[in-house]
């Protein structure tokens, strides 16, 4: 297998402000990061200018892979359009390559016909907004049973239907792929891979939630290693971005050591 390349999502160390977060990635030999717009008291939500983020990234030798995320992207309305423009402007000005697009995840918009129509409406509008700013859209299906976009096949078909293959790719999230139970991987349509593991032996798959998501190690129940191998075998050459949501990870006194151990485990196993 070829060597794998990693990225670091700010959710791996949300207690760090943006510059120490970039420095953490640098000490791990990681040169790509994902910044978020949902961390209170942190860039982007604290008002840090995009130009300042761009400068800090440059000082640390970082490439900003994405901003995570435009929420409820497939519920297209005037509010969503304004949010999309604001985030796309920020992404462009910060030097971010892409904007992650997260679907409605509250049990609404799931009806057959409705969800496909909503998805195409949103993608058609976003194709212009993102394209005008040189930012790629990364569509992230979620595996939760209440999500309005669980299927990567539906996402891929919609991207094709709106002529969006130049504007969009998908996020393959190893946690959500396992929950969705969809066998197909679509490596050629994958622009980013989010990795996290679940070690808890007591939680059933339907009951797995974000707080269960830890760093990938030998106890992983999601078969991250198998998923990564299959994606690479299918031609995926992009980044594997750490996105653990567990409070256990967030409270680590030494996140660098834990991340380094996970990197070493994945490299040895893949």
Image (cartoon, rainbow, N blue to C red):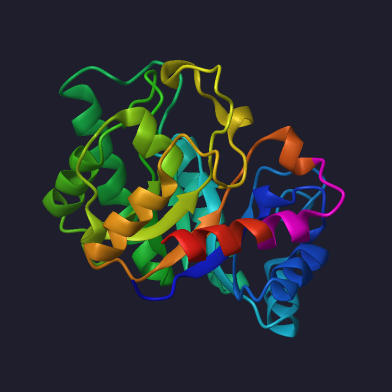
Q: Main secondary structure of the magenta part?
A: helix
Q: Residue furthest right?
A: 253
Q: Is residue 245 left or right of residue 240?
A: right
Residue pictured at 14% horizontal, 53% vertical: 160
- Residue placed most toward the observer, 114 or 83: 114
Quadrant of the frame with the C terminus? bottom left
Does residue 125 sit above or below 21 in this rendering?
above
Of 146 and 43, the residue lying toward us? 146
Q: Which residues are magenta?
A: 251-260
Residue at position x 61%, y 76% in the image: 31
Along the viewing direction, whichever of 152 and 24 lies nearer the viewer: 24
In the rendered image, is residue 205 in sight?
yes
Q: How many marks?
A: 0
Residue 102 appears in the rendering? no
Q: Going by the image, does 215 lie left or right of 267?
A: right
- Looking at the picture, does residue 263 appear above or below residue 124? below
Q: Residue at x 24, y 27 (%)?
A: 115
**Based on the displayed image, in which of its 4 quarters is residue 109 positioned?**
top left
Pinpoint residue 91: horizontal percent, then vertical percent.
Answer: 55, 64
Residue 11 falls within the magenta-colored stretch: no
Q: Is residue 99 left or right of residue 216?
A: left
Which image quadrant for residue 213?
A: top right
Q: Quadrant of the N terminus?
A: bottom left
- What percent of the width, then of the height, locates residue 260? 68, 63
- The foreground one among 52 and 183 is 183
Where is residue 166 shown, x and y percent of the image?
24, 67
Find residue 266 and report its horizontal and vertical position in percent. 51, 59
């Amino acid at each position: 297998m070829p060597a794998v390349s990693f990225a670091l999502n700010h959710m791996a160390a949300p207690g760090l402000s943006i510059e120490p977060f970039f420095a953490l990635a640098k000490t791990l030999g990681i040169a790509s990061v994902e910044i978020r717009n949902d961390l209170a008291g942190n860039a982007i939500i604290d008002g840090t200018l995009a130009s300042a983020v761009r400068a800090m990234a440059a000082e640390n030798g970082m490439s900003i892979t994405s901003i995570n995320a435009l929420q409820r992207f497939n519920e297209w309305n005037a509010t969503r359009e304004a949010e999309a423009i604001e985030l796309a402007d920020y992404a462009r000005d910060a030097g971010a390559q892409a904007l992650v697009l997260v679907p409605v995840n509250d049990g609404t918009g799931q009806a057959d016909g409705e969800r496909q129509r909503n998805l195409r409406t949103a993608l058609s509008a976003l194709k212009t907004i993102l394209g005008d700013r040189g930012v790629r859209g990364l569509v992230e299906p979620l595996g939760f049973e209440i999500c309005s976009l669980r299927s990567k096949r539906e996402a891929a078909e919609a991207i094709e239907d709106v002529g969006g293959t130049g504007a969009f790719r998908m996020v393959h999230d190893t946690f959500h792929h396992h929950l969705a139970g969809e066998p197909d991987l679509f490596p050629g349509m994958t622009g980013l891979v989010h990795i996290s593991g679940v070690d808890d032996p007591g939680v059933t798959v339907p009951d797995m939630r974000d707080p269960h998501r830890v760093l990938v190690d030998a106890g992983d129940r999601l078969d991250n290693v198998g998923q990564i191998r299959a994606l690479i075998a299918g031609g995926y050459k992009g980044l594997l971005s750490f996105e653990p949501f567990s409070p256990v990870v967030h409270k680590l006194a030494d996140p660098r050591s834990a991340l380094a151990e996970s990197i070493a485990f994945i490299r040895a196993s893949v």
